[in-house]
Amino acid sequence: MTDIVIDVRGLTKRFGDRTVVDHFDLKVPRGAIYGFLGPNGSGKTTTIRMVCGLLKPESGEGEVLGFDVLNDSLKIKERVGYMTQKFSLYEDLSIRENLEFISRLYGLDRRAERVDAALSDLGLAERQTQLAGKLSGGWKQRLALAACMIHEPELLLLDEPTAGVDPKARRDFWDAIRRYSAQGVTTLVSTHYMDEAVQCDSIAYIAYGKKLIDSPTAEIPKQIGLYGWRIAGRPLMRAQEMLEALPGVDLVARFGAEIHVCGKDSVALERAVRAVKGAEPHVEIAPIEPGFEEIFIYLMSGAMDNFQ
Amino acid sequence: MRASFNSLFDLSWARVFAVFLKELVQMRRDRPTFAIMIMMPVMQLVLFGYAINTDPRHMPAVVEMREDGPLTRAFLASLAQSTYVDIVAVTHRAEDGEAMIRSGQATFLISIPEGFERRLVRGERPQILIAADASDPVAAGGAIAAIQQVAMQAFAPEFQGSLAFLATAPAPYEIIVHRRYNPAGVTSFNIVPALLGVILTMTMVMITSIALTRETERGTMENLLATPVRPLEVMIGKTTPYVFVGAIQVAIVLIVATLLFHIPFTGSFLAFLAAVTLFILANLMLGYLISTVARTQMQAMQMTFFVFLPSILLSGFMFPFRAMPMWAQVIGETLPITHFLRIVREIVLKGAGFADVAGDLWPLSVILLALASLALLRFRRTLD
Ligand SMILES: Nc1ncnc2c1ncn2[C@@H]1O[C@H](COP(=O)(O)OP(=O)(O)OP(=O)(O)O)[C@@H](O)[C@H]1O
Ligand SMILES: [Mg+2]
């Protein structure tokens, strides 16, 4: 048993002449919860598909759960739970039939028992005969999650598993992931929610197919070296317009009734903020520690889209 | 590659069963499609059957009388009395008759040649020519048989007394039938067994041609491919439910054929079962192969018709096989329906057994194996 569950090097995927994932390396240790972040179209889904053998990379190599990622994909598939970004269970099968189909394909014993357990965990036991297609978006998401966990995989590859899921269910979901993690289950999860990003042990950030950041979550703010100021009061709109034009300001983001201004150059940033205070004496200013939200908005505003 | 080759054959029946069961449930839920599959044979048979049962009576006929004598006039009267033909015109000029049959005003042109009576009495066996518009073979088939009968008996009342020596067997004259526009003259007994082949080709190919395409279009393919299911398991599991649908269709056609059209079933039923099973499987594989190629359900449908057309045109269903150009025969030999049609005609109409149809059973098996292997090779294990 290796302790690096995902160890891929130089994964590259091209669609036509566009390189969608470019020399992607990733090492995920056993039991880790690895966050996978990046703007839309940056190549997250493509990367996850390559890791579980659903797409053949043009080049690159690696092992997943100790099996060769290029040639042993059947062995990998038996041990991986992959949740697709788009709902991919059968809408014309009932909830129960979907779960039974999956458990049959994995050759599970005590099938009825497992399906029952999954259904009651989900809270769908009474609705088990309902067609999956008739579920609301969030419930479909929760069903898909239950389906990819039913064979107790060693590695979970979750592609935006909580998109459209309500806050309570998301909380339950993350509690479950942490529980699995404690038992040694490894998770690679893509998300656009920053409150989820902070729950991950480590984060890989990808943009236009290239991995730009790969660190333990706690180290990322320091690594980026972003400084921030909070501006509140009135007139906020005018202050925002001024700030956007000033040098040293890399990011202006509205957070409810206040503005967060961030920049890499702390001196230039402070000068800009004070200039605004001089012009609009009614606003309040205070330095802040930029959060993940600011950091990733900052990163994404700089990222070229993969479309170009 | 080596790994994928091995994985072709280590199949788990539990996974096959999982796919089978899932497919069965989906089929049951897809009521309209299921209904069409069951109704199609009935509809086709009734539609064709209507044509077959078209009473061949009162067919419009034009008589070309090149001679006007007592015997020929008696023949005309006898024809006029018959309910099989209605004489719409009597002419003395060949062009008139030809024009009427070409324009469809008459289905039959009956020509009595010059010097008919004289040659009849001399025992020279003169000919009566019957040209039939067989462009609708189903309708014409029965009528041609009827008019031959009528013409044969039309003289009977005259061959008495001094002419009694003419009441011989064979008759003292010949009836030559020319089928215009369809020299093969497919008959009704041919049509019903052939229809079985056409119905099975149509439904079996069509239904499996979307087997994988539908999964791809709905996005469920991604989930299916992420499980450890093998291509062979998917193939068997996905096609087996339709073997039963095919069996139901065969049963329907057989029942209707015997009850409604009194088709004799003279040959070996076991050989028929073997042929029908091979044929259904071959069609399912053909459809499945299409579904590994087509990217959308629309494409799958188009490819199905691409296969369906030669199956009708080049299999011997429409035109006599041996009369087709060589290249068409070569294509025809690769179509499952060509062999099936031969087998079924042999068995149902001519009372053949296993040994008689072996020459078409093995090509059918080869086609089946080739299609299945090709489909397995074409199966995309990734989403690329
Ligand atoms: N099958 C395909 N054929 C062609 N291009 C593709 C295909 N799949 C993905 N792409 C392209 O690859 C790029 C990366 O897509 P991918 O789905 O991996 O992004 P993502 O990071 O998952 O985005 P999102 O956050 O929106 O889910 C996109 O520009 C997309 O258009
Ligand atoms: Mg994605």
Image: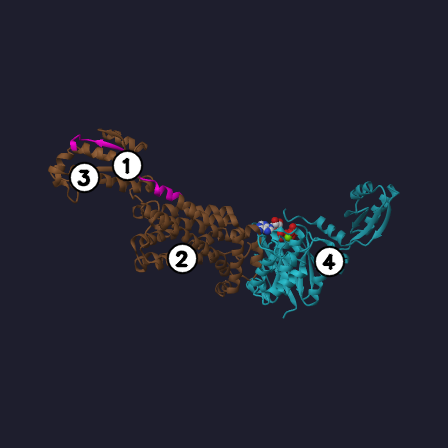
Chain colours: A cyan, B brown
> In the image, is B216 to the left or to the right of A83?
left
The amino acid pointed to by label 1 is Thr
Q: Nearer the viewer, mark 3 or mark 2?
A: 3
**Element at label 1:** loop
**Element at label 2:** helix
Q: Alpha carbon of mark 1 to alpha carbon of mark 4: how far?
A: 87 Å
Q: Alpha carbon of mark 4 to alpha carbon of mark 3: how far?
A: 100 Å
B204 or B153, nearer to the observer: B153
Q: Which residue is mark 2?
A: B277
Q: Which residue is mark 1?
A: B83
Q: Alpha carbon of mark 1 to alpha carbon of mark 3: how far?
A: 17 Å
Q: Which mark is residue A171?
A: 4
**Residue B126 placement: quadrant:** top left
The amino acid pointed to by label 3 is Ala
10 Å neighbourhood of mark 1: few (<14), some, or many (≥20)? Answer: few
In the rendered image, the vertical position of residue A194 relative to residue B6, given as above or below: above
**Element at label 3:** helix
> In the image, is A87 to the left or to the right of B204?
right
Q: Nearer the viewer, mark 1 or mark 2?
A: 1
Q: What's drawn in magenta, residue-wise?
A: B47-70
